[in-house]
Image (cartoon, grey):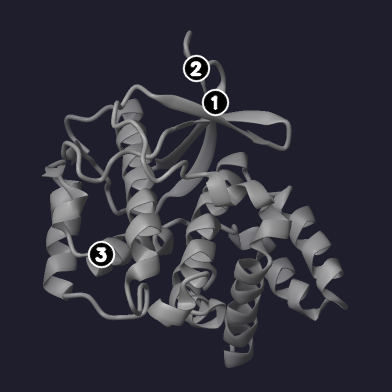
Amino acid sequence: MTGYSESQTASAMNMLLSDILSFINQKGPFTQGIFGKSASIKSCRALKKRLNCGDTVNLKDEPILVIAWVLKDFLRNIQGSIFTASLYDKWLDVIDQGNKEEKITSTQRLLNQLPRANVVFLRYLFAVLHNIEQHSSSNQMTAYNLSVCITPSLLCLPNSGSSENLTKQISFIQFLIENCLKIFGEDITSLFGETSVSSDNSDITDITDNSEKVAVTKEQSLESKPVRMTVFYKKGQLQYDAMTSSRMGPSTDLSTVF
Protein backbone atom coordinates (compact mmCIF):
# COMPACT_ATOMS: atom_id res chain seq x y z
CA MET A 1 0.00 0.00 0.00
CA THR A 2 3.08 2.17 -0.34
CA GLY A 3 2.34 5.62 -1.70
CA TYR A 4 -1.32 5.71 -0.63
CA SER A 5 -2.71 7.13 2.58
CA GLU A 6 -5.61 5.36 4.32
CA SER A 7 -8.03 8.09 3.24
CA GLN A 8 -6.84 7.89 -0.38
CA THR A 9 -7.29 4.13 -0.39
CA ALA A 10 -10.79 4.39 1.12
CA SER A 11 -11.73 7.00 -1.47
CA ALA A 12 -10.47 4.80 -4.29
CA MET A 13 -12.39 1.83 -2.85
CA ASN A 14 -15.60 3.85 -2.83
CA MET A 15 -15.07 4.82 -6.46
CA LEU A 16 -14.39 1.20 -7.36
CA LEU A 17 -17.55 -0.11 -5.73
CA SER A 18 -19.72 2.69 -7.08
CA ASP A 19 -18.50 2.32 -10.64
CA ILE A 20 -18.58 -1.47 -10.66
CA LEU A 21 -22.11 -1.63 -9.23
CA SER A 22 -23.32 1.02 -11.70
CA PHE A 23 -21.69 -0.84 -14.59
CA ILE A 24 -23.22 -4.19 -13.64
CA ASN A 25 -26.59 -2.55 -13.00
CA GLN A 26 -26.55 -1.21 -16.57
CA LYS A 27 -25.05 -4.15 -18.43
CA GLY A 28 -25.92 -7.11 -16.20
CA PRO A 29 -29.66 -7.34 -16.91
CA PHE A 30 -28.88 -7.85 -20.61
CA THR A 31 -26.01 -10.33 -20.12
CA GLN A 32 -27.02 -13.98 -20.23
CA GLY A 33 -25.63 -15.87 -17.25
CA ILE A 34 -24.26 -12.81 -15.44
CA PHE A 35 -22.53 -13.98 -12.22
CA GLY A 36 -22.91 -17.56 -13.46
CA LYS A 37 -20.86 -17.85 -16.63
CA SER A 38 -17.13 -18.27 -16.27
CA ALA A 39 -14.86 -15.43 -17.29
CA SER A 40 -11.31 -15.75 -18.56
CA ILE A 41 -9.25 -16.34 -15.41
CA LYS A 42 -6.30 -14.72 -17.16
CA SER A 43 -8.34 -11.56 -17.79
CA CYS A 44 -9.71 -11.57 -14.24
CA ARG A 45 -6.27 -11.83 -12.70
CA ALA A 46 -4.91 -9.20 -15.06
CA LEU A 47 -7.63 -6.71 -14.08
CA LYS A 48 -7.15 -7.47 -10.40
CA LYS A 49 -3.43 -6.84 -10.76
CA ARG A 50 -4.04 -3.53 -12.56
CA LEU A 51 -6.41 -2.41 -9.82
CA ASN A 52 -3.91 -3.37 -7.14
CA CYS A 53 -1.24 -1.36 -8.95
CA GLY A 54 -3.51 1.69 -9.13
CA ASP A 55 -3.65 1.70 -12.93
CA THR A 56 -6.23 3.75 -14.78
CA VAL A 57 -9.14 1.50 -15.77
CA ASN A 58 -11.97 2.22 -18.18
CA LEU A 59 -14.76 -0.19 -17.30
CA LYS A 60 -16.31 -0.09 -20.76
CA ASP A 61 -13.13 -1.69 -22.09
CA GLU A 62 -13.51 -4.67 -19.74
CA PRO A 63 -15.81 -7.67 -20.35
CA ILE A 64 -18.86 -7.55 -18.09
CA LEU A 65 -18.20 -11.10 -16.86
CA VAL A 66 -14.73 -10.01 -15.70
CA ILE A 67 -16.23 -7.04 -13.84
CA ALA A 68 -18.75 -9.37 -12.18
CA TRP A 69 -15.86 -11.63 -11.11
CA VAL A 70 -14.06 -8.65 -9.51
CA LEU A 71 -17.19 -7.80 -7.49
CA LYS A 72 -17.56 -11.39 -6.27
CA ASP A 73 -13.86 -11.49 -5.44
CA PHE A 74 -14.21 -8.33 -3.35
CA LEU A 75 -17.21 -9.73 -1.49
CA ARG A 76 -15.40 -13.00 -0.86
CA ASN A 77 -12.52 -11.16 0.79
CA ILE A 78 -14.55 -9.21 3.34
CA GLN A 79 -13.52 -10.55 6.71
CA GLY A 80 -16.40 -12.51 8.22
CA SER A 81 -18.56 -11.69 5.17
CA ILE A 82 -20.69 -8.60 4.58
CA PHE A 83 -23.31 -10.20 6.87
CA THR A 84 -20.71 -10.56 9.69
CA ALA A 85 -19.66 -13.88 11.20
CA SER A 86 -21.24 -13.14 14.58
CA LEU A 87 -24.73 -13.15 13.03
CA TYR A 88 -24.14 -16.10 10.70
CA ASP A 89 -26.41 -18.61 12.48
CA LYS A 90 -29.16 -16.02 12.93
CA TRP A 91 -29.29 -15.29 9.19
CA LEU A 92 -29.76 -18.99 8.49
CA ASP A 93 -32.45 -19.21 11.17
CA VAL A 94 -34.55 -16.72 9.17
CA ILE A 95 -35.43 -19.47 6.71
CA ASP A 96 -37.00 -21.48 9.52
CA GLN A 97 -39.37 -18.67 10.50
CA GLY A 98 -43.10 -19.18 9.92
CA ASN A 99 -44.47 -17.08 7.09
CA LYS A 100 -42.98 -14.54 4.69
CA GLU A 101 -43.82 -11.54 6.84
CA GLU A 102 -42.11 -13.09 9.87
CA LYS A 103 -39.03 -13.77 7.75
CA ILE A 104 -38.99 -10.15 6.53
CA THR A 105 -39.33 -8.82 10.08
CA SER A 106 -36.53 -11.08 11.34
CA THR A 107 -34.29 -10.00 8.45
CA GLN A 108 -34.87 -6.32 9.15
CA ARG A 109 -34.07 -6.79 12.83
CA LEU A 110 -30.78 -8.44 11.91
CA LEU A 111 -29.96 -5.69 9.41
CA ASN A 112 -30.29 -3.20 12.26
CA GLN A 113 -27.46 -5.04 14.01
CA LEU A 114 -25.04 -4.65 11.10
CA PRO A 115 -22.61 -1.74 10.74
CA ARG A 116 -24.22 1.10 8.84
CA ALA A 117 -21.85 0.79 5.87
CA ASN A 118 -22.74 -2.88 5.42
CA VAL A 119 -26.44 -2.05 5.19
CA VAL A 120 -25.87 0.75 2.69
CA PHE A 121 -23.75 -1.52 0.52
CA LEU A 122 -26.31 -4.33 0.71
CA ARG A 123 -29.07 -1.96 -0.44
CA TYR A 124 -27.09 -1.11 -3.57
CA LEU A 125 -26.05 -4.69 -4.19
CA PHE A 126 -29.58 -6.05 -3.95
CA ALA A 127 -30.85 -3.21 -6.10
CA VAL A 128 -28.52 -4.56 -8.79
CA LEU A 129 -29.57 -8.18 -8.20
CA HIS A 130 -33.25 -7.19 -8.30
CA ASN A 131 -32.73 -5.36 -11.59
CA ILE A 132 -31.02 -8.41 -13.08
CA GLU A 133 -33.75 -10.76 -11.81
CA GLN A 134 -36.41 -8.56 -13.41
CA HIS A 135 -34.87 -9.41 -16.80
CA SER A 136 -34.49 -13.13 -16.10
CA SER A 137 -36.58 -14.08 -19.13
CA SER A 138 -33.69 -12.93 -21.32
CA ASN A 139 -30.62 -13.32 -19.08
CA GLN A 140 -31.70 -16.64 -17.50
CA MET A 141 -30.76 -15.38 -14.03
CA THR A 142 -33.76 -16.02 -11.80
CA ALA A 143 -33.58 -15.22 -8.09
CA TYR A 144 -32.61 -18.84 -7.47
CA ASN A 145 -29.91 -18.89 -10.15
CA LEU A 146 -28.46 -15.62 -8.85
CA SER A 147 -28.43 -16.92 -5.29
CA VAL A 148 -26.62 -20.11 -6.32
CA CYS A 149 -23.94 -18.07 -8.09
CA ILE A 150 -23.38 -15.29 -5.54
CA THR A 151 -24.02 -16.97 -2.18
CA PRO A 152 -20.48 -18.44 -1.91
CA SER A 153 -19.14 -14.88 -2.11
CA LEU A 154 -21.77 -13.31 0.13
CA LEU A 155 -22.52 -15.64 3.02
CA CYS A 156 -20.36 -18.74 3.05
CA LEU A 157 -17.79 -18.77 5.85
CA PRO A 158 -14.72 -21.00 6.17
CA ASN A 159 -15.71 -24.33 7.72
CA SER A 160 -19.35 -23.24 7.68
CA GLY A 161 -20.47 -26.83 7.73
CA SER A 162 -22.77 -29.18 5.94
CA SER A 163 -24.58 -29.17 2.63
CA GLU A 164 -27.70 -28.38 4.66
CA ASN A 165 -26.10 -25.07 5.62
CA LEU A 166 -25.32 -24.33 1.98
CA THR A 167 -28.94 -25.03 1.07
CA LYS A 168 -30.08 -22.61 3.76
CA GLN A 169 -27.57 -20.00 2.62
CA ILE A 170 -28.83 -20.18 -0.95
CA SER A 171 -32.46 -20.12 0.21
CA PHE A 172 -31.81 -17.05 2.35
CA ILE A 173 -30.11 -15.07 -0.43
CA GLN A 174 -32.92 -16.08 -2.80
CA PHE A 175 -35.42 -14.84 -0.22
CA LEU A 176 -33.58 -11.49 0.00
CA ILE A 177 -33.62 -11.05 -3.77
CA GLU A 178 -37.30 -11.93 -4.07
CA ASN A 179 -38.33 -9.65 -1.18
CA CYS A 180 -35.70 -6.91 -1.37
CA LEU A 181 -38.25 -4.15 -2.02
CA LYS A 182 -40.02 -4.87 1.27
CA ILE A 183 -36.79 -5.49 3.17
CA PHE A 184 -34.66 -2.60 1.89
CA GLY A 185 -37.39 -0.23 0.70
CA GLU A 186 -38.98 0.25 -2.71
CA ASP A 187 -36.71 3.24 -3.36
CA ILE A 188 -33.80 0.89 -4.07
CA THR A 189 -35.09 0.71 -7.64
CA SER A 190 -34.02 4.33 -8.11
CA LEU A 191 -30.68 4.26 -6.25
CA PHE A 192 -28.73 4.47 -9.49
CA GLY A 193 -30.70 7.43 -10.79
CA GLU A 194 -31.93 7.99 -14.31
CA THR A 195 -30.47 6.28 -17.36
CA SER A 196 -29.22 9.58 -18.73
CA VAL A 197 -27.45 11.77 -16.21
CA SER A 198 -24.68 14.31 -16.05
CA SER A 199 -21.15 12.94 -16.25
CA ASP A 200 -19.81 15.75 -14.07
CA ASN A 201 -17.97 14.00 -11.24
CA SER A 202 -18.93 16.77 -8.84
CA ASP A 203 -22.66 16.09 -9.08
CA ILE A 204 -24.18 14.82 -5.84
CA THR A 205 -27.64 13.55 -5.04
CA ASP A 206 -29.08 12.65 -1.64
CA ILE A 207 -30.98 9.46 -0.92
CA THR A 208 -33.21 9.30 2.13
CA ASP A 209 -32.80 6.03 4.01
CA ASN A 210 -34.45 5.53 7.41
CA SER A 211 -34.59 9.30 7.95
CA GLU A 212 -30.85 9.62 7.41
CA LYS A 213 -29.22 11.35 4.46
CA VAL A 214 -26.74 9.25 2.58
CA ALA A 215 -24.70 11.25 0.09
CA VAL A 216 -23.83 9.34 -3.06
CA THR A 217 -22.46 10.34 -6.42
CA LYS A 218 -24.88 10.32 -9.32
CA GLU A 219 -24.53 7.49 -11.77
CA GLN A 220 -21.77 8.40 -14.13
CA SER A 221 -21.88 7.97 -17.87
CA LEU A 222 -20.06 4.71 -18.62
CA GLU A 223 -18.76 6.18 -21.83
CA SER A 224 -17.00 9.05 -20.09
CA LYS A 225 -13.41 9.42 -18.95
CA PRO A 226 -11.48 6.48 -17.48
CA VAL A 227 -11.34 6.33 -13.71
CA ARG A 228 -8.36 5.65 -11.50
CA MET A 229 -9.21 2.96 -8.98
CA THR A 230 -7.09 1.29 -6.35
CA VAL A 231 -8.11 -1.79 -4.41
CA PHE A 232 -5.89 -4.13 -2.45
CA TYR A 233 -7.30 -7.63 -2.16
CA LYS A 234 -6.46 -8.44 1.43
CA LYS A 235 -8.82 -9.58 4.13
CA GLY A 236 -10.75 -6.52 5.16
CA GLN A 237 -13.71 -5.45 7.20
CA LEU A 238 -16.25 -2.89 6.11
CA GLN A 239 -16.70 0.03 8.44
CA TYR A 240 -18.84 3.13 8.63
CA ASP A 241 -16.98 6.43 8.78
CA ALA A 242 -18.56 9.85 9.17
CA MET A 243 -17.31 12.15 6.43
CA THR A 244 -17.64 15.90 6.82
CA SER A 245 -17.65 18.39 4.03
CA SER A 246 -18.87 21.95 3.79
CA ARG A 247 -20.82 20.97 0.71
CA MET A 248 -22.03 17.47 1.54
CA GLY A 249 -22.43 17.49 5.30
CA PRO A 250 -22.27 14.14 7.18
CA SER A 251 -22.49 11.17 4.90
CA THR A 252 -21.79 7.50 4.60
CA ASP A 253 -18.33 6.37 3.54
CA LEU A 254 -18.01 2.72 2.61
CA SER A 255 -14.41 1.75 3.16
CA THR A 256 -12.26 -1.25 3.87
CA VAL A 257 -9.71 -1.52 6.62
CA PHE A 258 -6.64 -3.41 5.42
**Residue wearing tag 1:** 251
Residue 145 image position (x, y, % from top left): 49, 82
Single out the mark in the foreground, 2 or 1. 2
Residue visible at 20% across and 57% down in the picture? 48
Residue visible at 54% across and 69% down in the picture? 155
Viewer-nearest residue: 124 or 77: 124
Label 1: state its secondary structure: strand
Relative to 111, say whether 167 is above or below.
below
Single out the mark in the foreground, 3 or 1. 3
Q: Are the two marked residues, 3 and 2, in contact with CB atoms closer than 8 angstroms?
A: no
Relative to 238, say whether 80 is above or below.
below
Q: Are the two marked residues, 2 and 1, in contact with CB atoms closer than 8 angstroms?
A: yes
**Residue wearing tag 3:** 64
Q: Residue flagged by tag 1: what amino acid is it?
A: Ser
Residue visible at 20% across and 38% down in the picture? 224
Relative to 240, say whether 183 is above or below.
below
Q: Is residue 139 left or right of residue 106?
A: left
Mark 2 and mark 1: Cα distance apart in space: 7 Å
* Res 258 seen here: no
**Residue wearing tag 2:** 248
Q: Is residue 141 left or right of residue 82?
A: left
Q: Looking at the image, is mark 3 or mark 1 earlier in the sequence? A: 3
Q: Looking at the image, is mark 3 or mark 2 earlier in the sequence? A: 3
* Res 48 seen here: yes
Q: Is residue 114 left or right of residue 40?
A: right
Viewer-nearest residue: 191 or 196: 196
